[in-house]
Amino acid sequence: MPSSVYLLLCLSYAVLPVSTSGRFLVTAPSVFHVGMKERVSVQLLQSPRDVSLYLEDETTGLVVSNKVTISPTEDRAIQTVELEVNRDQISELDIFRTETPYLLLVYDDQPEKRDMVRVLVSQHRGHIFIQTDQPIYNPTQKVKFRIFTLDHSMRPHTEPVHISVINSGGNTVKRMLQNPDGGIVSDYLKIPDVSEPGVWKIVAHYQGDEKNAVTREFQVKKFVLPSFEVSIQPMESYFLADWEQFNFTILASYSYGETVNGAFHCRFGVREEGTDGSEGGKAQTVFIRGLEKAGSVKDGEAVVSVQRSQILNLLNRNNIDPVDLKQLAQNGARFYITASVTDIYSGELQETEVVLPIVANRYSVDLSRTRSYFIPKVSFKVQAVVRFPNGSPAPDVKVEIQTPVSNLKSQTATTDSEGIVNFFFSIPEDTPAAKITAIVDGQQHEMTALPASSPSRSFLFISMNSKVVTPGVGISADIDFITTGDRPLDGNIYYMVLSRGELRKSDKVTAQEATSIMLSISSDLTPSFRLIGYYYNQGGEIIADSVWVDVKDVCEGKISLSSKKTYRPGSKAELEIDLHGQKAKVALLAVDKAIYALNAQNKLTPKQVFSSMQSYDLGCSYTGGRDTAAVFNDAGLSFISHSSTSRSQMRKGFACERGFRRQKRSLNLQKLMRSKVSSYTDEKLQKCCQDGFTLIPMTLSCEERARRVSRAGKEEACLSAFLDCCREGVKQRDIKMRQEALKGRGRTADIGEMEDFFDTNVGNIRRFFETSFEFREFDVNGEKKHSLILPDSITTWEIQAVSLSASHGFCVSEPHELLVFKELFIALRLPYSVKRYEQLFITAVIYNYGHDKRELSIHMKSEEGLCSPGSASSLSYVNVTVSAGSAKTVTFSAVPMVTGKIPVTLLLYDKKEEMGRDTIQKTLLVVTEGIEKREEMSYFLDIDGRSGKSFEIDGYLPNSTVPDTGTNLFVRIEGEVFGKATVLPLLSTSGVEGLLRAPFGCAEQTMIMMSPTALALRYLDLSLAWKELPPKTRDTALAHIENAYSRILTFKKEDASYGAWLNHPASNWLTALVVKVMSLVLDRQLAGRGGPRAPGHGVCVRAGDL
């Protein structure tokens, strides 16, 4: 009898999936976002009545979305509806107290059927981007910032945004709720002058979406803008353990593009994670003594080489255990290089560093784009992606693929420009598993592919030849469909296109022997999309497959910037903004590129935008899965269907279990080169001559310009015409300049004229040296010419622009550089501050980038409060001769006599041309002598709410206070007696000794040590505040309590009372204190039962001990 029942059940199970009654398919995102309209696809093939779709809470049965009714259509097409989770209805539901809140997507076909699937719910909705006007600030500076708020489709979002500003001490100094104006919140923050140096943060999130808050960091510290930048250009972005020699180049250039001459010094080291012995496991750099390098920097370059043998010898010189580079690679060590460059003229020193991973292998191989499940009777495609250790693609690398089960046991090919290579194998149908081995540079990488599953042995295979497609009008991608086994029941293959977790397109195509479609690649498919295809076989079973397609990162909105390449300091520049016929709001920002030499990189980039867009992709694989259910689920879809064999699985978490990410693309250097060459496309000699005549500030000689033209591929005749016309133009302009200078004079300069210039020149002073400017937003319709009043800095400005519109979304432009330059100028760099009565040397560097030698005089103006013999009168000047293409240094000694800001003004006069050439003024900050000292005092108030209390704060300054010193008194009040201000000082690294000391002495002393520790443990447990303290602090507290507990029991008398010593009388207050503290420990013990304990830190308090 039992056997018969078993057989009947098996037959019933086999019949269900092939039933043709009531076939339907509903697909929806596996994650619904609160407040967002999510698109759900519905296909009703044989439903005689309308059906409803909605979302409900499983526990309460509460419907928390709109209800949508769908009617069957004659063509059985895929219909799209929208469901939105109601934010107000779910705000109080218990589901949001869990890590993965979920709802039920209900398919209601009353009275016949009510089916459902669980989908996750996220408060994450839309995108937020934060931009500051600088990456680093001095105290007292104003931080300008703006926050772009966008919905999931990258359109302006009007929902209020929560904004917090957190200082370097972790304190929130500003908190606000702002309503965006057209998707932009613009605000500012002034940094107090007493701010401690460190990293500040601006944090923004939508209501309820704190887990996905966006953070933008910026530094606050005292700095002086550098005049030149140093960078290290290694031969590769990694350090291969087998290399016998490692070469790198040190590059040094001024912010206006010219090269630096000077000297360099290099140090080397090895950095390993968690080797400093600290609880946080921070990385420690061990410098390799004896490996230092020094030399000259000529024309902005210096080439340095280090030998592998020398590194190993010096590393092992003092080590007992020999160190091998391959061993360091296995430990995740990195090779550290720091280089400093000193300018030969100004003596300014700038430094930089680079950390390179030490690797044992030159390449890494990724086989994740190869299907994990092969389809019988279909050619199996193996795709290998070869990358360098930094993640960039490795082109032209030989790859061998071995597949023993295939008819072709081995194949060899070379990677393309993206580091990708494809192989095709035929795998026998009855193969249980196919082992695939990729061999690159002698290293093996393996994976195993299993056969796909289908009860009817029917399969669908989707393929696409293009690796990366470009969106645009008229651009399409060729998609191929191959079916095996049963043919489609209704003769159609249906497909859906998903991008960023949203259904973009759906359609069908008639199945043929070779089925193909041309899919239009629109901008809403950026940065990637998934195509899911399926059909119904003869038994009604759903057969599906999917493919992931990478799309080139191109904005839907277009924005480009252009201007003249070079301007003079303080002049007006015309910036042309082109939106290519679109209308949008443009947010502009200009930043001095010199600030990036301070290793402060926090600018908003296109890469950040596309990465944020990609984060909405819910899929977790590149290709189809083991069966139909896996195909839909791995593509980020949950589904409901008539099939009993294909059931959707609930998503386990918001992130993928397997690491899925886009490949880092190679830079299109050819495109950049074509752009550079495009200005010299005319081959006629007249045009070459016209180019030579073109006036530019002579940052380059004619010979240097001609060499650039030669690199662009011009013929010898063109180069000759260019050079001749360029030289003639320089000659004629020089003659005209001399004639204009001598017009109406007929004599040379005398001392009187020089004195007049030094005494009266107050105009055209270069005094405005902003680090950033033009932090503005304005509307642009198509194109606009925007005027910029340039500061007085001689530098390169980086113009950043962002466009935002309701029609074309959000786009960050590529930075546009604008050079501000003059041939002859003074460079003056002052320290951030000096102390009163401190003697200093004011160093001025005169740069002459012209073609002629200059006879010059430089003078420093006299200023009240600054004593300098070099500025006693207008006759106090220094004569210098500066050769063409060189520089000279002039030094003035000075002593500041007062505190505050003192202007330092230098004037440069050309004696031969009888005219002033440059005037520069910067501010010297003078502070009082001595060192800053801070003292903190705490006062505890117990206010009952009925009466006030007063107390005095001792505001007297110590006798050693320097006269005329600025002082500050800060008062901070916290509502909790045991608040953060108390907890952090007590349990910080510096204050932990005062609270968590090990017990000692008599019973009274033991309890004095144990009481605050027990109270702190209870408070931090209940407030969940351990995360604010260093790791292992709780273990330390438990260890001290355990020791105190063991110690106090030694003072327990027979009647359970306690005295200071066993031979001392019992003390009522001491016994009461023991009972109180032990009760607290027992309470913590009972609350923590069943949870994990730190080994060796278990305190077992028995009721009898109380």
Image (cartoon, rainbow, N blue to C red):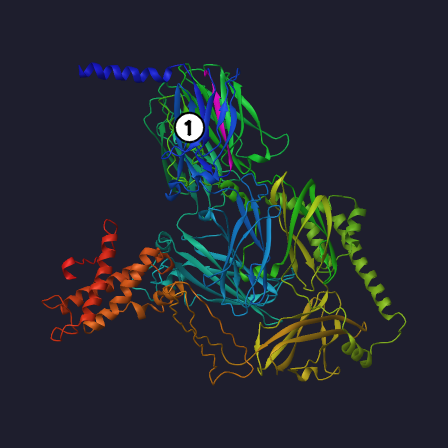
Residue found at the far front of this picture? 946
Q: Which residue lies furthest to the left in this view?
A: 1054
Per the picture, the main secondary structure of the magenta-coloured stretch is strand
Q: In the figure, is residue 797 to the left or right of 237?
A: right
Q: Which quarter of the picture shows residue 107?
A: top left
Residue 37 lies in the magenta-colored region: yes
Q: What residue type is labelled 1?
A: Val
| Residue 444 occupies quadrant | top left
From the top left corner, tell me how far across and down residue 852 is, in percent: 76, 67
Q: Which residue is drawn at 70% across and 66% down?
A: 885
Image x and y of residue 253, in percent: 61, 61
Image location (x, y in percent) of residue 727: 78, 58
**Relative vertical location of residue 195 with respect to residue 178 in this rendering, above or below:** below
Range of residues picked out in magenta: 36-47
Which residue: 79% across, 47% down? 687
Which residue is identified by label 1?
A: 106
Q: Where is the C terminus found, in terms of image quarters?
A: bottom left
State whether residue 374 appears in this view: no
Residue 1063 appears left or right of 879: left
**Camera-nearest residue between 690 and 837:** 837
Front-most of 894 and 584? 584
Find out whether residue 881 is within the magenta segment.
no
Q: Is residue 492 left or right of residue 591?
A: left
Can residue 494 be seen in the rendering of this structure?
Answer: yes
Rendered location of residue 1049, percent (x, y): 15, 66
